[in-house]
Image (cartoon, grey):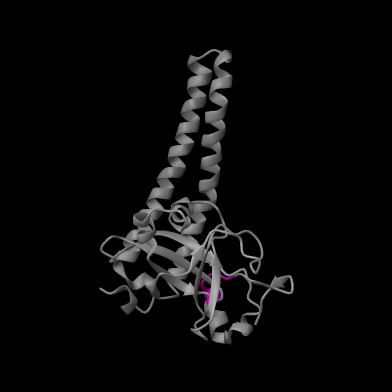
């Protein structure tokens, strides 16, 4: 099944399977880091003398930090599903991207891609990774000095969403049949020190309502 044939990305069976695998991997990571923290603490308290505490503290702190991060990652996976249930996949070849911060973007940014405005396809809009969690894989392939074989892995990217609001980006498998590495992209372009009105990009009331169903918390008409 061609992923772009489905009316929304969630109707593409490989997408549902890939999302389920990502959910399972993140759930296992949460339980794994919690279990590691408990195990390290138990070893320190039960089997070792207090003198070993200094050696265990860095590992305890790191495992606690990773478990804490997973508490934010898991809800994000479910928010991605809302986007996948609302928008179809669009495939883009050689989408412009970069890691340097853009002056026209407000707030945190951890790399960006540009995609065509649905209302004006000649106009490219930047979308950014709003969080640093889990974007290392993407960043390594977006780096200017990345090896060609790494860059080729994002030569084609899949986007479910609206560049004026929100989106889920994915990289295809080698046979380009299945998405992987789902991550959020958001629209954070500023105008006069604040968020731009989506009406400037031709968004209609229907577009805004669709964005809200996909999880956009605020969109100025």
Which image quarter is the C terminus in?
bottom right
Locate residue 48, reporting x and y percent: 51, 14
**Residue 198 part of the magenta segment:** no
Is 48 or 147 nearer to us in this picture?
147
- With respect to residue 16, does 141 lie above or below? above
Locate residue 171, reporting x and y percent: 38, 62
Locate residue 208, reporting x and y percent: 57, 80
> How many numbered dots are placed on residues in this image?
0
Image quarter for residue 212? bottom right
Q: Identify the magenta region.
A: 211-216
Is 92 or 84 nearer to us in this picture?
92
Residue at 63%, 84% (x, y): give it: 200
Which image quarter is the N terminus in?
bottom left
- With respect to residue 15, does 88 lie above or below? below
Is 135 or 102 nearer to us in this picture?
102
Residue at 63%, 67% (x, y): give it: 105
- With respect to residue 2, does 33 lie above or below? above
**Residue 214 part of the magenta segment:** yes
Residue at 53%, 19% (x, y): give it: 45
Residue lying furthest right in this view? 192
Residue 180 appearing in the image? no
Residue 171 appearing in the image? yes
Locate residue 111, reporting x and y percent: 54, 60
Residue at 28%, 74% (x, y): give it: 2
Left or right of residue 12: residue 57: right
- With respect to residue 30, does 207 lie above or below? below
Left or right of residue 138: residue 12: left
């Amino acid at each position: 099944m061609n992923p772009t044939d489905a009316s929304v990305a969630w109707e593409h069976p490989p997408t549902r399977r890939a999302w389920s695998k990502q959910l399972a991997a993140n759930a296992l990571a949460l339980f794994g880091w919690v279990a590691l923290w408990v195990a390290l603490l138990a070893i320190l308290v039960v089997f070792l003398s207090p003198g070993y505490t200094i050696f265990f503290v860095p590992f305890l702190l790191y495992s606690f930090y990773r478990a804490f991060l997973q508490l934010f990652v898991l809800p994000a996976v479910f928010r991605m599903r809302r986007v996948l249930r609302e928008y179809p996949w669009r495939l883009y070849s050689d989408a412009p991207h970069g890691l340097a911060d853009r002056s026209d973007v407000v707030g945190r940014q951890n790399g960006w891609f540009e995609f065509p405005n649905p209302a004006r396809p000649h106009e490219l809009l930047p979308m950014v990774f709003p969080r640093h969690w889990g974007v290392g894989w993407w960043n390594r392939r977006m780096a200017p000095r990345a090896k060609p074989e790494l860059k080729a892995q994002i030569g084609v990217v899949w986007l479910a969403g609206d560049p004026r609001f929100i989106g889920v980006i994915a990289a295809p498998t080698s046979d380009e049949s299945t998405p992987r590495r789902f991550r959020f992209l958001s629209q954070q372009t500023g105008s006069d020190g604040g968020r731009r009105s989506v009406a400037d990009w031709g968004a209609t009331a229907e577009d805004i309502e669709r964005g809200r169903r996909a999880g956009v918390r605020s969109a100025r008409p």
